Image: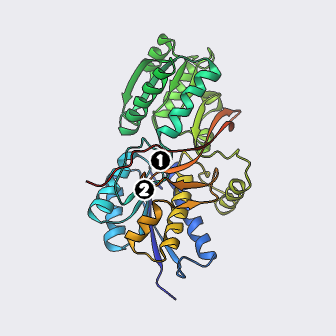
């Protein structure tokens, strides 16, 4: 039997983000098995080397070092928090010179010749969502409670820009540790401000007590709206329905999509993994699927594992089918053009209310320094 092609995956399978990271791990297992069932890649089997980063950036960095230096993987995928991406990037890309694909929606602006991103970015989420919310609900004022790391800061800058351009106003903006638990004073300030919309970038575990406090304050009863761009089916199932009824999100996939490929993929995932995290976009499951399949397409085009050839092919790789629809790398941007959707939480389900079509990531084309 020919030597296996090695795919390394680092996922937060334990720790606070396990409900998301375990889903990424499951998708990697599913796709690797499907590649092998269809004959492998370049006539060789693929071998998945799966590591748990335990929602700890130091652990993620150590796992990246292991996969690159000891296991000598041909490609590396994984990570949720942007800080985790940076922790992986150092040993994998900058020191190890290994191709790395980051699957999670994030703040954009990442560039390295060996790093590709397969999740959504602000041009695909904030830019269409804020004008839509303002148009559909009449909202004009926004409050921005946030976790204190790079993703919320950059997303909030984009909210400022887009809301202002559409006649809106930011009436409050605050930052806290990701595990912040006492939100009483923040919620008082939100209600005192009269904000129409809370654009939420608090994240697990801090988002759970925040949403509880916001609901108990009467914010939703008075007609306030919650908007958050990472919200998915796993988080919907983890929160009491009254905390999130009417919440709006914008991402590349929801389980309520009815296209045959998305429904078929969801069915295969559910049959393989009937327990545990659901297949969702917020967890990076869609970006993991897309990342492995786009890499597979690039390797097939290159006809070898020569990294220079694979990277050149990945720069314009396409898949005709994927969760939420087709996807393609935008040449020179290392980010994906894909379909985007706006959904609303209704009776504990995320229902698509607007299909936005394919949206360009609009990341700047840059060259390595």
Relative to residue 174, is residue 205 depicted above or below? below
Tell me if 170 is positioned left or right of 342 in this view.
left
- Point 43% across, 31% down: residue: 158
Q: Which residue lies furthest to the bottom in this view?
A: 1
- Point 45% across, 33% down: residue: 202
Quickly name the residue at label 1.
17
Q: Position of residue 215 (x, y in %)?
A: 57, 23
Q: Choose top left, top right, bottom left or bottom right for residue 268.
A: bottom right
Sequence-first disc among 2 and 1: 1
- Using the image as rendered, state which of residue 113 and residue 52 is in the foreground: 113
Q: Can residue 204 be seen in this view?
A: no
Q: Choose top left, top right, bottom left or bottom right for residue 137.
A: top right
Image mark for residue 116: 2
Tell me if 361 is positioned left or right of 286 in this view.
left
Q: How is the image coloured?
A: rainbow
Q: How many residues crowd around disc 2 within 10 Å: few (fewer than 14), some, or many (20 or more)?
A: many
Q: Position of residue 51 (x, y in %)?
A: 43, 63
Relative to residue 153, is residue 84 depicted above or below? below
Q: Can residue 173 be seen in this view?
A: yes
Badge nearest the viewer, 2 or 1: 2
Q: How many residues crowd around disc 1 within 10 Å: few (fewer than 14), some, or many (20 or more)?
A: many
- Point 43% across, 25% down: residue: 160
Q: Choose top left, top right, bottom left or bottom right for residue 232.
A: top right
- Using the image as rendered, state which of residue 343 and residue 132 is in the foreground: 132
- Point 33% across, 62% down: residue: 92
Q: Residues under labels 2 and 1: Cα distance?
A: 22 Å
Q: What element carries label 1?
A: loop
């Amino acid at each position: 039997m020919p030597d296996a092609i090695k795919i390394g995956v680092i996922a937060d399978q334990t720790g606070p983000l396990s409900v998301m990271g375990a889903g990424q791990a499951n998708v990697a297992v599913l796709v690797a098995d499907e590649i092998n069932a269809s004959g492998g890649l370049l006539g060789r089997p693929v071998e998945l080397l799966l590591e748990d980063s335990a929602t700890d950036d130091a652990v993620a960095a150590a796992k990246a070092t292991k996969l690159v230096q000891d296991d000598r993987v041909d490609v590396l995928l994984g990570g949720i928090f942007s800080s985790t991406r940076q922790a992986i990037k150092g040993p994998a890309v900058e020191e190890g010179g290994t191709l790395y694909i980051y699957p999670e929606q994030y703040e954009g602006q990442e560039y390295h010749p060996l790093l590709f991103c397969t999740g959504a970015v602000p041009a695909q989420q904030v830019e269409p969502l804020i004008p839509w919310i303002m148009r559909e609900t009449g909202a004009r004022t926004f409050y921005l409670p946030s976790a204190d790391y790079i993703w919320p800061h950059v997303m909030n800058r984009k909210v400022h820009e887009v809301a202002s351009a559409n006649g809106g106003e930011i009436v409050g903006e605050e930052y806290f540790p990701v595990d912040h638990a006492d939100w009483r004073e923040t919620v008082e300030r939100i209600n005192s401000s009269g904000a129409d919309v809370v654009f939420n970038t608090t994240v697990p575990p801090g988002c759970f007590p925040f949403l509880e406090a916001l609901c108990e304050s009467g914010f939703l009863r008075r007609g306030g709206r919650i908007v958050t761009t990472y919200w998915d089916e796993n988080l919907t199932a983890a929160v009491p329905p009254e905390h999130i009824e009417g919440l709006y999100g914008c991402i590349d996939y929801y389980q309520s999509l009815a296209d045959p490929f998305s429904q078929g993929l969801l069915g295969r995932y559910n049959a393989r993994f009937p327990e545990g995290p659901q297949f969702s976009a917020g967890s990076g499951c869609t970006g993991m699927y897309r990342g492995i399949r786009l890499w597979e397409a690039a390797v097939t085009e290159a006809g070898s594992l020569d990294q220079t050839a694979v990277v050149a092919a990945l720069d314009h790789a396409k898949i005709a089918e994927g969760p939420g629809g087709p996807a393609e790398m935008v040449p020179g941007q290392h980010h994906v053009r894909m379909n985007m959707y706006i959904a609303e939480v209704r009776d504990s389900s995320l229902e698509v209310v607007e299909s936005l079509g394919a949206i360009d990531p609009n990341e700047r084309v840059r060259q390595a320094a």
